Image (cartoon, rainbow, N blue to C red):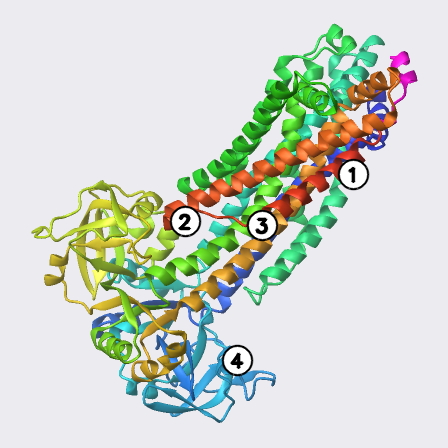
Amino acid sequence: MRKLTFPLAWRLFLDDIASSHYRLLQMTQAIMMVFIITLTLASESVQNHLSLNMANLLGADAVISTFGALPDSHIEQLKAQSNAFIFTQSIKTTLTYKERWQSVTLKAVGNSYPLKGQLQVSDALAQAPYPSLSPPTPGTLWIDSRLASSLGVDVGERLSISRLSLVVSHIVQHEPDRLLEDHNVDMRALLHKDDFNKLGFSDDNIEYRYQMNANDAQLKRIVAYQNSTLLSAQLRHRNGVHPLALFWQRTENFIGLASVLLLFMASIAIFQISRLQIKKEQFFAAVCMSVGASRAQGFYISLVKWVLHLLLLFPVVLIVATWSHWALVSWLSDSLPSLLWKPNIATTVFSFIGCALLVALFQLPVWLSLKHASVRQLVFNLPTKKRSFLGVLCTLVAITFVAFSYSDNGLLTTMVLGSMASCIFLIAIVSWLSLALGEVITKRYSGLIPFTTFMMRKRLVSKSTQIMGVGLCAFLLLFTLMLLRDLGNTMHSYNRQFDGNLVISQANEKQMDSVMQWANAHDAQLRQRKPFVYATLTRINQQRLDDFATRPSESLATFKQAIRLHWTDNLPANNKVISGQWWSDDAQQWQQVSVEQEVLTDLGLNIGDVLTFAIAGRAVEFTIAASHAYIPGAGSMTFWVQMPASAMSHIVAPHYVMASLEVSEANLASLGILYKQHPSLRMISIREMTQRFDDTLALVTKIISGFALIIVCLACIVIVSSVLTYEQRERKKNSVIMSFGLPRRLCLTLNLIEWVITGSIAAFGAMFGTWLAGVLIYQSQFSMTYQPDFGWLATTLCIIVLTVVLIGYLASKRSLSSTIRELLTD
């Protein structure tokens, strides 16, 4: 019998690939494998790209960044630990040209710049770049191509920064230390240090970057010096982590967590098909045992056949995953210009093996049904409850494994999985209640609809899985295409009502006085005004920030930079206390703060923890006394960390203001007056903020639409697999109907009614889920009632129902061809 193991497995394999349900199974497995392998390959490409950039595009061996110049003693220490040393200065400012203005990052360099690498420039926008042997000379300005296009300026013309006029001499195409800009997309301009010093910018607004060349031993000493002395400064070095590495890791983990939904959809289809698998495998095992074979030999045949299926899948998955990897890398190259596609067969093979182990977990119930079943069970094909339970258990194990693999943040994992579970639970409840109530309401009546409802109720699990698959797909599309667009419009109107249409993100007292004079002259209304100082979190409970917080999060990424620290005695109208106690107006204890509740969760903080901030070069300790959260209805300007007003009598640091105004559209064009007087004044209009939201929404829509396309494929597979599972019963039902002399078209009518009901329940469930999500988001963020576009919803309902009816009809076409002779044969 052992000699016949492979021939029998091969024969069964050929029989399987000829059957429709096995083709569906392999399609489901292929989709799941392609998604996982593509994500793995893309992740490796990005990580390799970041490692290469870190080594070649840092512009130095080590760079220390800080706002405000370091004391001379620190600079001397750094020079002593390096072979070469230079520094650059950067500030966010505004350039003006005629009546136009544009916010830019202005960088000042000396004659020794760059320390490593080459500057690439061109003499005009359309010309090819070439290496420059020297940096900008005094009196000249180099700008990037986007800035030239935005202002409409050509080489040889003059641009103004405050009262300084500079000649545009080159278009800068590449800076060797551009990597330090992280994922900053600001437009760029370069000038000489001598010209920069004439502008008189406040030193605390200037970012200094001290660039050093050092060997490995010197590099270790620089790292140790920064960790012990320069805690508020940020260090990047050639052996360190890329600035975008944390951002990409968080993105990858979120996509990985989202794949749980795909895994759930695939498990539904596999669970349906496994019923047919078990019947077929049991029948063959019974035949083998009837001629003297053992259960183990039957299991070996099944195992060899499963390996043959994997070998058939491998080239298909390899080709599709490689193409998907190429397409994804091409799309990402817009954000990472030097990212290149490179095939990696080794990673693909290892990823495929990992996916095979995951597929084996879903196959486990089928194998165990053969190994542990008795001869009587095999012959009579008796199902056991243990198999269904085992199938559910394997699904939960697979989902838990994927969630655990990609989880780096408990809050993010809980939110993603919780939202998915809520959506699935909601659609399941809607489908079960709809079918149950439909049967109760119509059971007293006769006709096609009551009969169809009765039959659907008898196949509750099958119908629920179909509704769930379609409903999840529709919910994702509705949420992206409708709710997020409505949300963008509502954000615009909400900000306009409470914040006005012009936000001042940073202004000192002198700049704010000029703003108020301009506002009075142009009939603008001040909506909000809140003071702050810049502070950098350096230690938590006497531990370095990187040592205390090891999990990537939005809060950690933000706290690695300077944050706005607001002072107030009264609880802001748009905040509420979540835990702890807010201080009184005459609080004597000034070293206490309230921290945003989400920040506490992200960083793992608690009431009573001690935070050490670097403020204007001085370390100041605060104890967390309370946590607060944002509430809508009083503006959107809020702060993550707030302290008592009495603290300002103990802190010597530059004061800044955030404010918002309502300005007429006509007067927005005259903001250039303010920018000419105060080029470092930071303002942004609601129109620009809305455009940024729309750009982000377009990106999210592309991602979710691609994700929803995979869900559509799996939803179709779920529908078809459930039809195949109950095909024999459907054929019997149709034969019985025709045996009473009823026409075949009646069977078709019943089938169409069944799919109309299935599509309607799924569509209503998806629309109800979208409406509920809208209500919750609008209530929590705006204290408003969500009003969806009902015309849009009605159109969506019709499209979903028609699509489901068409797919269901095509899937059920074979069962509609049954005859009365088949009933007599059975």
Q: Earlier in the sequence, mark 2 or mark 4?
A: 4
Q: Amino acid at mark 1?
A: Leu
Location of mark 4 (residue): 145
792 or 706: nearer the eye? 792
Quadrant for residue 192, please give it: bottom left
Q: CA distance from mark 3 to mark 4?
A: 32 Å
Look at the image and give the residue range highlighted in magenta: 815-826
Majority secondary structure of the magenta segment? Answer: helix
Residue placed under numbered mark 2 in the picture? 552
Whether residue 245 is visible here, answered yes or no, is no
Q: Is residue 650 visible?
A: yes
Q: Secondary structure at mark 1?
A: helix
Say the numbered circle drawn on residue 704: 3
Query: How many neighbours does mark 1 have within 10 angstroms: few (below 14), some (14-19), or many (20 or more)?
Result: few
Q: Is tag 3's residue or tag 2's residue first in the polypeptide sequence?
A: 2
Q: CA distance from mark 3 to mark 1?
A: 30 Å
The answer to whether the residue labelled 2 contacts the one labelled 4, judged by CB atoms less than 8 Å apart, is no
1 and 2 marks in contact (CB < 8 Å)? no
Circle nearer the N terminus (3, 4): 4
Q: Position of residue 234 (x, y in %)?
A: 33, 63
Residue type at mark 3 is Ile
Q: Quadrant of the C terminus?
A: top right
Residue 49: x and y, percent? 55, 61
